[in-house]
Amino acid sequence: MLKYQETLQAVKEYILGHDDFLVISHLSPDGDAVGSSLAMANLLKNLNKRYTVVNEGSCPRKFSYLHLFDEIIDLSQQSIQRSFKHIISVDVADMSRFGNAHHLFAENAYIVNIDHHPTNTLFGQLNLIRSDAASTTEILFDLIDQHFSHALDTHVAESLYTGLLTDTGGFRYANTNQAVLEKAAKLLSYDLKPAKIAERALETMTASFLELLKLSLNTLSFAFDGKVAILSISLADLEKAGANREDVDGLVAYPRNIEGVEVGILLKEWSADEVKVSLRSKELVDVSGIAQKNGGGGHVRAAGFTYHGDLNQAKKHI
Ligand code: 5GP
Ligand code: MN
């Protein structure tokens, strides 16, 4: 396998040597998914390349301050009647995380897989993976800083910074380190407004989110001597709160942050027989292992999987 620096070089050459790219990220996109997609889209635009940015499902509106946000096509709302040969996948650990987007890949498609999940399945023809990177945008920073610095402008910088900010929980999680802060500082030199970005990406809550929080707190329960805390959200709760799936993002921090708790769990009932499980740990438990055993994946401190059954069964299973 190519070393990191050589792979950065190979990705650079691939981008320069081709045109008409499909940029895609994962289901339930977070700040790193949206930031990575738009950093790549803005880079391609600055390089005068043609590109199409898609996602299976809508991207949270809170990231609408990012340039080209409105160009992201939600495949669940709008179909695309063609296929692409050149795919750039960002922040996607395995191909199931594309959702139903496979039909957009041409038969001889070449996938450039750029990601930081330790559970990445290396599904690309070219795999630019660094599992110790704080975010996928940190890897994109390396690519752009080293090879495309002439195309690095405010829009690219703001997208990269957003992924760094959100995947480190506002530069607080264990993936925050000197290199991350130095890269963030370098990005700020592109005339970014960090307080404004933090307010949009981290602080602002929808009223629906608070309604959901109210409802889910009633479900709080503990296991393993108070070391595991569990919250759940039912379909009825979602409806009652007038919330959609993206409003649920962030709820899992509440059980995790309780004093004495090592693992926080959120069970989200997506349908009568489908429960999305989010796992967060503080310092001892590798939740990516638990997620992988259940057909999912993620990081040591943040992972998830889909459980097929109802909420009660999911809770018992956990
Ligand atoms: P979340 O709990 O916020 O949905 O996800 C936490 C982390 O686990 C993210 O890095 C996400 O990509 C990963 N993750 C969540 N669900 C799945 C899944 O079903 N499969 C895989 N491979 N990763 C997941
Ligand atoms: Mn990420």
Image (cartoon, rainbow, N blue to C red):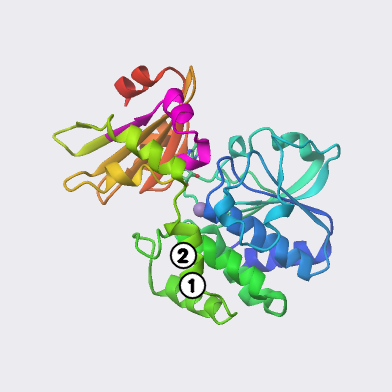
Local SS, label 2? helix
Q: Residue at x 66, y 59 (%)?
A: 38
Alpha carbon distance from label 2 to label 1: 6 Å
Which quadrant would residue 32 be assigned to in this image? Answer: bottom right
Pointer 2: what residue? Answer: 198
Q: Quadrant of the C terminus?
A: top left
One can see residue 133 in this view: no
- Tag 1: amino acid: Pro
Q: Residue furthest left?
A: 225
Pointer 1: what residue? Answer: 194
Residue 126 position in % (x across, y down): 67, 53
Residue 142 position in % (x across, y down): 58, 70
Q: How many marks?
A: 2
Question: Contact, CB < 8 Å: mark 2 with mark 1?
Answer: yes
Residue 207 position in % (x across, y down): 45, 44
Q: Quadrant of the N terminus?
A: bottom right
Front one among 224 and 111: 224
- Tag 2: amino acid: Ala
Numbered range of the magenta stretch: 230-248
Give left or right: position of 303 versus 155.
left
